[in-house]
Image (cartoon, rainbow, N blue to C red):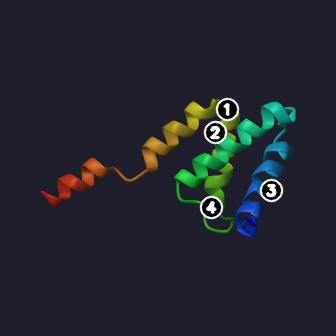
Amino acid sequence: AENDPEIDALYDFVARAMRERGNEANAALFLPQLYSILGFLAAMGLDRLGVNDELIIVAIATHEQLGDEGLRTIFAQFRPDEDAENEDEA
């Protein structure tokens, strides 16, 4: 299967931004961090550049400071709240 060029561009952007922000981890440490950020972005519905680049930078900075737990906190705050939607229907 061919890779999606837009996903490849996002991958490259995130990896480059992480390095530019001073992440000097070797591949064994860097790749799990990169995949964690990309997984968070995918969960937020962001799979390409140019849609919400600010969120990409926030995700990288948050992961740098707070790790996966920081990303889970953001996700919990910004994902649609299904309970609230269900209350609206009542």
Residue assigned mark 3 = 12
Residue assigned mark 4 = 47
- Do residues under tags 1 and 4 come within 8 Å of each other at their CB atoms? no
**Comes first in the chain, label 3 or label 1:** 3
**Comes first in the chain, label 4 or label 2:** 4
- Do residues under tags 4 and 2 come within 8 Å of each other at their CB atoms? no
In the rendered image, residue 80, in percent from the top left (x then y), is placed at 38, 53
In the rendered image, the quadrant that contains the C terminus is: bottom left
Residue 26 lies in quadrant: top right
- Measure the alpha-carbon separation of dots 2 and 3: 18 Å
In the rendered image, residue 9, in percent from the top left (x then y), is placed at 77, 63
Q: Seen in the image, is 81 located left or right of residue 16?
A: left
- Measure the alpha-carbon separation of dots 1 and 2: 5 Å
Query: Which type of secondary structure does the marked residue at label 4 adopt?
Result: loop
Query: Which type of secondary structure does the marked residue at label 2 adopt?
Result: helix
Q: Of the numbered discs in the image, which one, if any, rests on residue 65? A: 1
Q: Amino acid at mark 2?
A: Thr
Residue assigned mark 2 = 62
In the rendered image, residue 11, in percent from the top left (x then y), is placed at 75, 55
Q: Amino acid at mark 4?
A: Asp
- Do residues under tags 1 and 2 come within 8 Å of each other at their CB atoms? yes
Q: Amino acid at mark 3?
A: Asp
Q: Residue furthest left?
A: 90
Q: Seen in the image, is 32 located left or right of residue 51?
A: right
